[in-house]
Amino acid sequence: MRKRTPWKTGITAAALAAILVQASVPALAADAQTSVVSAPSVNYGLTSDIRAALKGVSVESTAQGLQLAAVVRLYNGGTVQNRVPEHELRIRQADGLTYTLKPSATNKTALQPKEIGELVYMATVDSKAEFKPAELSLVNVNEYTYPKQETTLLTLPAADQVWYGAGSENGRQRESLAWGTTFRIPGLNSELVYTPVGLSKQSTAQGNADVVTLLVENPGVGKETVPSFRIDGRAAAKTYTGAFTDKQPVVVEAGAKAYVHIAIPYENGSALTELFVMTTDTFTQAGNPATQIAIDTGRLKLALPDGGQADRLPDAYTLGTPIAFDPLTKVVDAQTEVSLMELHLHENPDEGYQTVVGKFKITNKGSIPAALPAFQTQLVSGTGATYAGSRQANVAETLNPGLSYVISYSFNVPQSEKGDALTLKLLDAQTASPYVSTAASLATSVQQETIEERLDLYPFDVKLNYYTISAATTGAQTIAYTYKVLLDLDIAQAEDVVADANSSKLRFEVVDTLGRILGSTDGVFTGTNKLVSGRQTLTFANIKSEQLEFPVTVNVYEVIQTPGGEAKRLLKTLR
């Protein structure tokens, strides 16, 4: 029996070992910058030029019986085309029980120089007995002699490379990698390394899902496309299949990094407890190419982070300063700067809930027009409650160089929310749509309201120098009541900041001594009849009262139009 055929030594053998395959037993390999969980490559000589390595073995119970599958990777290190020796593939467990697997119809019969080929084998046995493979053998059978002659070409150890399924006790015994551990995926011909950096529970119209974010790094010398794999989740006695959400193949240049996102949908009431990195090979039935069977193999098991979720840690933030985005995000380009200018809690007394409104200044630092970034937002309270943000209903599409634009986002929150110890997340909703990923995270709180003569309504700064309130009665047959407010204002607008009809406005509400609103009028900062510096009079007509009420007070609010309606913030009370 031919177990371990020695082959070429030195640099060539080392290079081929790296090319062929990684075994499934992870071992820590020291790296100059980080520790990467990988595995030593194990391969053997099949012929003088062809090397062989076991990519993986799968043993799973199906409705048809016990499904046995194996994938062997070959590499032709010669300088000419070489035929793959004719053979059968047999799988044997320690007690000697052996099965012969059928080859896939698409298995290569020859390899070009320096070519890598994968041979897939499978058999379904009508049995419920436990089967634990110990080794695989490639056996040449000469049926033209009597008795027939069998020659073992190569035997590969297999006990440590068997996948029994996520639900089996054998599969569950596989050691978990701690969350955040950097790893290579055993069995893939790839130099890419992966680090789990994000796990978030998300809900869309399609249902609930856990979204896993992996940081991909390419330590090689050439660009590489992220190979096909997925991450499945296990909850109680059920396995949920994950899938990439990235719309395009992710290509990572040499020395570069990128993110990939895998969504694992699950049923209501479920909570994932284990994650499995999976690869899939395809078995094509001989004589029926249309019949293809997917062979899933678990490569690694990942432990979930503490609390079942993980995300970018929030940065300490000062209002008005540029936001530090994840350098790999695509939601904001390099020439666009984003700053949070205001974060206020609006009480909305008539609605039964509060609204937090954040104003972001978007600045084009480049030399050509730029599209306004379409990021989404979330607000996380100190207790962990997460509130979705609503983007301002109407915004400009582009911004010219050297100018800024203000966009408001609103968050409806319960009356109990105090606005302390908040985390404000800016989200990329395009790369992994319909799911989101965090592009920036800010540790902040709502601003404390102060009733002063100076009113901050970014990008406008309004100073109230003087005001008077008066009332009048008009008409003989039909009596009408009118209130007027004389204002003396100084209005300054931030330089190079574009303001339009979507900007916030002032609302003046006349309130009687019982707190009833008698009438209101709005003051805008753009367009016709806008508020200006100097003296001006606001008139409140159509007063809802059968008699003249005086004295009255005038409440001054900032009003912002949100997709959920108007949000109001009390700025000052005029008496």
Image (cartoon, grey):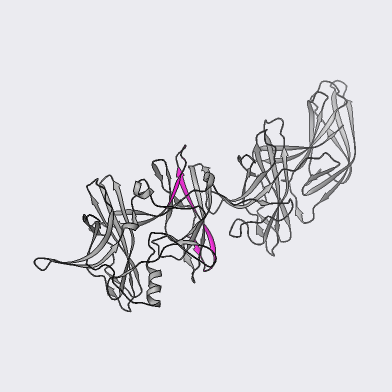
Q: Residue at 65% of width from left, 47% of height from top? A: 424
Q: Does residue 330 appear to the left or right of 297 in the view shown?
A: right
Instruction: Please identify the quarter of the rendering in which residue 507 is found.
Output: top right
Instruction: Please identify the quarter of the rendering in which residue 525 is found.
Output: top right
Instruction: Please identify the quarter of the rendering in which residue 515 is found.
Output: top right
Q: Does residue 486 appear to the left or right of 294 in the view shown?
A: right
Residue 256 is inside the magenta segment? yes
Q: Let me know if residue 154 appears in the view.
A: yes
Q: Does residue 566 appear to the left or right of 42 in the view shown?
A: right
Q: Position of residue 184 (x, y in %)?
A: 45, 61
Pick whichever, 536 or 66, lies toward us.
66
Q: Let me know if residue 201 appears in the view.
A: no
Q: Position of residue 209 (x, y in %)?
A: 49, 44
Residue 429 is inside the magenta segment? no
Q: Position of residue 106 (x, y in %)?
A: 28, 62
The magenta segment is: 249-276
Q: Residue at 50% of width from left, 67% of height from top? A: 219
Number of marks present in the image shown: 0
| Picture quarter with the N terminus | bottom left
Q: Residue at 40% of width from left, 62% of height from top? A: 188
Taking 423 as reference, is 56 above or below it? below
Q: Residue furthest bottom?
A: 79
Q: Position of residue 457 (x, y in %)?
A: 78, 45
| Picture quarter with the C terminus | top right
Q: Residue furthest left?
A: 146
